[in-house]
Each structure stands twice: as C-alpha cells, then as structure tokens.
Amino acid sequence: MRYLTLKINPTTELSIDNSIWGKETIKLNGAIVSEKTSIWGSEHCFEVLEDSKEVTYKVIIKMGIDIRVTYLITRDGQEILNDEKESQKGIRVKSWVKSVGIVIWIFAMLATLRNGGSVVLPLALLPILLSFGNTATLVRNIDLTTSKSI
C-alpha cells in the first residue's frame, strides 16, 4: 500500500510503500532504493545521482503512540519533510477511539482463544480497525515544488 508520494523537485519523486507484513519499500523515481521489514518503523539511508551530483537521503519511518505513521526525510542533511512534529501536537479524539477499539479487540481475541473459538474473524477485522480514522492521513501526496499537499 502506498503511504506517501513526495515530489521533491521537478525530476525527483520519492514514494513509500508498506505491506501488511511490515515490508517497507522506498522508491525514487519508481526505482527501489531501499527495502526493510519492520513493525514499528525503521531508518533507510541511500545515495543517488541527481544532476550529476551524489545526494544522500535518509528516511526514518516511525509508528507513533497514536498508531499514526510518521516520516522524517532528509536530503544531504537538510530536513525536507518532518510530520512527526504534527503528530506530537497531542492525541486526537480519533486516536483515542482507535486505541480503545484496539484494547477491546485484544480482550475479544483473548476471550476467543480461551474459549477455543476460531480467530479467523478477529484477525480479518484487525486491518479494518487499524485503518479506522487514517483515511485522510494514511495516503499522502505532497509536492514540494509547489509546497502543497495534493
């Protein structure tokens, strides 16, 4: 699933994909430049040629306390995107609702296991629960050449 598309300049576009199994894939102009598997996030460092100059990127992906994915992206040490600052402004009501839902899901899962029931339905509902409230912030397209979210 595509989490972020970031147009850095007219010729450079960075995208972040993540699978349900935690495989993070960083692409620059459609070419894979880094892949890692992580549950809570990881750090990706890579170097590429841009206009005959070697450029170093660092992409840090984190899972916040409010179960929101945040990014810190630097290019040659210069911060170009840091949405972790936005996440630190406080836990929103949606996050509280999601957190309570996850706690209820955990107790329901434990009760199901204790009573010898099937875990197929609770496991099938987990991705839906985790995506609740993220529709506006989960998939993002940002164009730094115009400084707008699209």
Image (cartoon, rainbow, N blue to C red):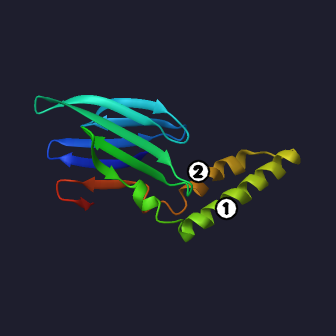
Type of residue at label 1? Gly
Which badge, 1 or 2, is on the more N-terminal residue? 1
Type of residue at label 2? Pro
Using the image, tell me which numbered label, if any, was put on residue 40. Answer: none
Image quarter where the C terminus lies is: bottom left
Q: How many marks?
A: 2
Q: Which residue is mark 2?
A: 127
The label nearer to you, 1 versus 2, is 1
In the image, is 55 to the left or to the right of 123?
Answer: left
Q: Secondary structure at mark 1?
A: helix
Question: 75 or 139: nearer the eye?
Answer: 75
Q: Which residue is mark 1?
A: 101
Image location (x, y in percent) of residue 58: 34, 37
| Rendered position, 92 above or below 62 | below
- Identify the residue shown where x is 48% and y is 46%: 62
Image quarter where the N terminus lies is: top left
